[in-house]
Image: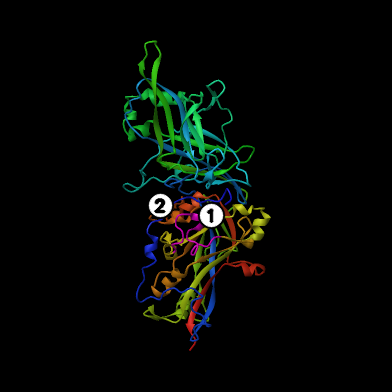
């Protein structure tokens, strides 16, 4: 697996049960090789191809709180550059703390874990890892500069202008609504100073460059106050790879320890009003960087930990005896990503009626696509294309399913990558999204095929592969250029024919992790800040990924007609 392949671990529940649910009156879906003219002489198999309307929906600012994950860093592709920063509340593990006599901070550490997988141990017995959530150019990780500020903006739980108990939405362009912006001055309060230990002198020294060394090595957490018989710091624990920053204790002495006994440390409401969190701002190094997906929801590893000591006794010779302790601040549930786009390839809204020649898909505040099946009117048949399709495949009574004329074996939407355009833009094949997500854009939910596909719901790279086929690349090699996506929608088509479902518009988006879109697992759609379409939303997995691609649409010129998007239906019908 390449370093930049995303494989976040999120488990979907109960999907396998749905695969056994069927109606006695419905035909079961048959794979296209189960019935064919070679084994069933009374049946013929054939394939229909249908035109599809596909068009680009350029996105206004997207809601970036309640994402579950957090992004940080720099990403460059054919569209241009995206820079991601974030602000988060902090939540104390305990309230009304008693720090003890003459409490003094030894160190303050910020932990931002990556998503990683342990792969074994090296010759020294250290655990080795692969990173599943760092997107970087080439084989090497690119470092970033990170600045951390005290946040002075109060992050609300509820929208004061909305209905009762309506959650507050925050957006990628640093706003709470089209009329309420979040000032950079409020986000950038006191800047926190990075420090490190000088192993030679044992003293703390200031770090001046704030450079984050991105690597796949874990951390050994050691106690600076407890030395072993060799004079080395004693090992406390080993931690998986991530960002680990030591901060100057002075700010935390005044902000936390000095407030012992104060009401500001007595409960969550008082604390979040008093200390409104931290703002993490990413910057390039030598005009380059990496894009990180951070596991800030980890209850054990994502936090700010204050290591301090307190006086417990004095010996007869006058030496003080001090005990070590910690005070932990977890990252709160209110985290907001801000995405700054510097696009050299502009994205415009497409033609929702006639469709586009090119479909632009881009994660974050980028673009999704609208997909319409069986649109238009068939003059020869004297009915709509949708009615013509239904009449070809089923018998109807009162416009409802009565019996089948053809049995749908398999139905696929096929999208070809616009290789010419990506090559002109010199796009790195590693930047091409491996997965796309197709969904019901009206009801904002997955298609029935999503629930019935129980292929590996643990590893996103291998989940839902029957329904949401991975990008097919040249010679099927992972690092080669992309060719096409084939998305199986057999049960969705059967629903239109057999169960009189509505022929809704579909949505298409790039996806960081297709498992996230299961509504039983997480929020699956977030708002888009628009004036003309207040109901527009975008899949969460699309907001979280910076990746993008360009596909052929339906309005391609004749020279590219073979790459035009289409719906194919493989079917079986009696030959008598």
Q: Quadrant of residue 493?
A: bottom left
Q: Main secondary structure of the magenta part?
A: loop
Dot 2: element: loop
Q: Earlier in the sequence, mark 1 or mark 2?
A: 1
The residue furthest top is 317
Relative to 20, residue 102 above or below? above
Mark carried by residue 131: none
Relative to 574, residue 359 above or below? above
Residue 502 in the image, given as x and y percentages of width and height: 41, 69
The answer to whether the residue labelled 1 contacts the one labelled 2, judged by CB atoms less than 8 Å apart, is: no
The colour style of the image is rainbow
Residue 195 versus residue 337: which sits nearer the camera?
Answer: 195
Q: For mark 1, does the 10 Å Cα neighbourhood hold few (<14), some (14 to 19), or many (20 or more) residues?
A: many
Calculate the distance from the C-alpha at mark 1 to the C-alpha at mark 2. 20 Å
Dot 1: element: strand
Residue 149 in the image, given as x and y percentages of width and height: 49, 32
Is residue 467 shown in magenta?
A: yes
Residue 440 in the image, given as x and y percentages of width and height: 44, 62
Q: Is residue 95 left or right of residue 343?
A: left
Is residue 512 in view from this perspective?
Answer: yes
- Select label 1 or label 2 by which is in front: 2
Q: For mark 2, does the 10 Å Cα neighbourhood hold few (<14), some (14 to 19), or many (20 or more) residues?
A: some
Residue 324 in the image, given as x and y percentages of width and height: 40, 25
The residue furthest bottom is 576
Relative to 2, residue 392 above or below? below
Relative to 259, residue 142 above or below? below
Q: Which residue is mark 1?
A: 367
Q: Residue at x 60, y 56 (%)?
A: 478
Q: Which residue is mark 2?
A: 523
Is residue 533 in view from this perspective?
Answer: no
Magenta range is: 453-470
């Amino acid at each position: 697996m390449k370093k930049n392949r995303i494989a976040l671990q999120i488990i979907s529940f109960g999907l396998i049960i749905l695969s056994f649910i069927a109606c006695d009156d419905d035909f079961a879906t048959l794979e296209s090789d189960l019935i064919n003219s070679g084994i069933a002489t009374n049946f013929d198999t054939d394939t229909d191809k249908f035109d599809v309307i596909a068009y680009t929906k350029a996105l206004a600012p997207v809601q970036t709180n309640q994402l579950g994950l957090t992004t940080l860093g720099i990403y460059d592709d054919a569209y241009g550059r995206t820079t991601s920063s974030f602000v988060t509340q902090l939540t104390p593990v305990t309230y009304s703390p008693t720090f003890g006599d003459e409490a003094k901070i030894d160190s303050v550490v910020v932990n931002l874990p990556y998503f990683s997988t342990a792969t074994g141990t090296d010759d020294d017995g250290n655990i080795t890892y692969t990173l599943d959530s760092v997107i970087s150019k080439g084989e090497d990780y690119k470092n970033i500069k990170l600045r951390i500020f005290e946040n002075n903006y109060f992050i609300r739980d509820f929208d004061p202008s909305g209905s009762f108990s309506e959650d507050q939405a925050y957006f990628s362009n640093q706003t709470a609504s089209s009329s309420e912006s979040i000032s950079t001055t409020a986000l950038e309060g006191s800047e926190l100073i990075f420090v490190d230990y000088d192993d030679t002198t044992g003293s703390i020294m200031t770090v001046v460059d704030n450079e984050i060394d991105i690597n796949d090595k874990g951390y050994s957490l050691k106690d600076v106050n407890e030395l072993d018989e060799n004079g080395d710091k004693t090992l406390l624990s080993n931690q998986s790879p991530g960002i680990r920053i030591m901060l100057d204790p002075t700010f935390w002495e005044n902000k936390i320890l000095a407030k012992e006994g104060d009401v500001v440390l007595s409960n969550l409401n008082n604390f979040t009003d008093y200390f409104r969190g931290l703002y993490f701002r990413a910057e390039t190094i030598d005009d380059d960087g990496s894009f990180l997906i951070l596991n800030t929801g980890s209850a054990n590893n994502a936090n700010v930990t204050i290591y301090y000591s307190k006086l417990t006794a004095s010996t007869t010779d006058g030496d003080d005896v001090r005990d070590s302790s910690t005070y932990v601040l977890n990252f709160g549930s209110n985290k907001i990503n801000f995405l700054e786009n510097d696009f050299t390839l502009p994205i415009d809204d497409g033609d929702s009626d006639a469709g586009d020649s090119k479909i632009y898909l881009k994660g974050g505040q980028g673009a999704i696509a609208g997909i319409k099946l069986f649109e238009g009117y068939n003059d020869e048949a004297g009915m709509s294309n949708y009615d013509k399709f239904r009449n070809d495949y089923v018998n109807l009574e009162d416009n409802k399913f009565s019996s089948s004329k053809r049995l749908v074996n398999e139905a696929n939407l096929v999208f070809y990558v616009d290789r010419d355009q990506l090559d002109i833009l010199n796009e790195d094949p590693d930047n091409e999204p491996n997965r796309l997500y197709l969904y019901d854009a009206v009801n904002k939910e997955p298609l029935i095929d999503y629930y019935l596909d129980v292929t590996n719901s643990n590893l996103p790279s291998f989940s839902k592969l029957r329904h949401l086929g991975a990008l097919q690349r040249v010679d099927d090699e992972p690092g080669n250029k992309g060719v096409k996506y084939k998305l199986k929608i057999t049960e969705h088509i059967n629903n239109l024919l057999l169960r009189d479902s509505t022929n809704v518009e579909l949505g298409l988006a790039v996806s960081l992790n297709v498992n996230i879109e299961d509504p039983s697992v997480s929020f699956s759609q977030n708002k888009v800040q628009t004036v003309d379409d207040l109901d527009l939303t975008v899949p969460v997995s699309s907001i979280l990924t910076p990746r993008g691609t360009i596909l052929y649409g339906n309005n391609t010129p004749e020279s590219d007609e073979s790459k035009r998007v289409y719906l194919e239906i493989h079917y079986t019908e009696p030959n008598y």
